[in-house]
Amino acid sequence: MELMYHLSMNNLFAVNIFFIGQFILLGLFYNSLSQIKNQKIFIKISLFTALSSLAVQFIIDSSEFFKFNLFEITLTSLLIVVFALLHFYNMLTENKIFYYVSIGLVFYLLASTVLFLIGNLSSGLSNEVKYVTWMLNAFLILIYQFFILYEWKQSFSKKNSLT
């Protein structure tokens, strides 16, 4: 994306591909973690409905794929948060599998979705304010990565030291 920016190319389609890919992969991830049939059905229907909605949006106005698509960001991020919350609910009676990853994911997606919504609405603000917004998002990504690292250390490093 950085190279595309320096070549003065529109790189927003890559952001759209990222959000759709993230939605599919994390939806399938939470679907695989769920042991409850109704939740699995809900996740699959949500994936299908959201992707169909986005496909219809892109078919009606293909230029949306090359724009900063707040509908796509909000829809995919909030559905992933719902999937993670279902996983938290399941963990009340089960083992805490991918607990810290889910905490980091919910925290990051909720905060970054708000930042994206605010950032798009504040396009008339100074470049310094926009820079602070993107730096805050980068900081949130870093926190999310630390949650993943902590999960890895808790879940997998003990197994390696026992062998």
Image: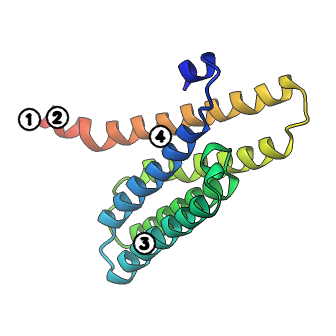
Q: Secondary structure at mark 2?
A: helix
The residue drawn where x is 85% and y is 38% is 123
Task: Rate crowding at label 2 as few (under 14), some (14 to 19) or many (20 or more) other CA atoms within 10 Å.
Answer: few
Q: Residue 89's spot in the image, x, y percent?
A: 46, 71
Q: What residue is shown with label 4?
A: 147
**110 or 19: nearer the viewer:** 19
Q: Earlier in the sequence, mark 4 or mark 1?
A: 4
The residue drawn where x is 35% and y is 57% is 29
Establish if 143 lies above or below 106.
above
Q: Nearer the viewer, mark 4 or mark 1?
A: 4
Q: Residue 88's spot in the image, x, y percent?
A: 46, 65
Q: From where the camera sits, is residue 78 visible?
A: no
Q: What residue is shown with label 3?
A: 43
Q: In this image, 23 relative to 16: left or right?
A: left
Separation of marks 4 and 1 at Cα, in angstroms: 25 Å
Task: Rate crowding at label 4 as few (under 14), some (14 to 19) or many (20 or more) other CA atoms within 10 Å.
Answer: many
Q: Residue 33's spot in the image, x, y percent?
A: 32, 64
Establish if 114 lies above or below 76.
above
Q: What residue is shown with label 2?
A: 160
Q: Earlier in the sequence, mark 2 or mark 4?
A: 4
Task: Rate crowding at label 1 as few (under 14), some (14 to 19) or many (20 or more) other CA atoms within 10 Å.
Answer: few
Q: Nearer the viewer, mark 2 or mark 3?
A: 3
- Looking at the rendering, in which quadrant would you find the N terminus? top right
**Amino acid type indicated by mark 4:** Phe
Residues tagged 2 and 1 counted as in contact (Cβ below 8 A):
yes
Q: Secondary structure at mark 1?
A: loop
**154 or 98: nearer the viewer:** 98
**Amino acid type indicated by mark 3:** Ile
Q: Nearer the viewer, mark 2 or mark 4?
A: 4
Residues tagged 4 and 1 counted as in contact (Cβ below 8 A):
no
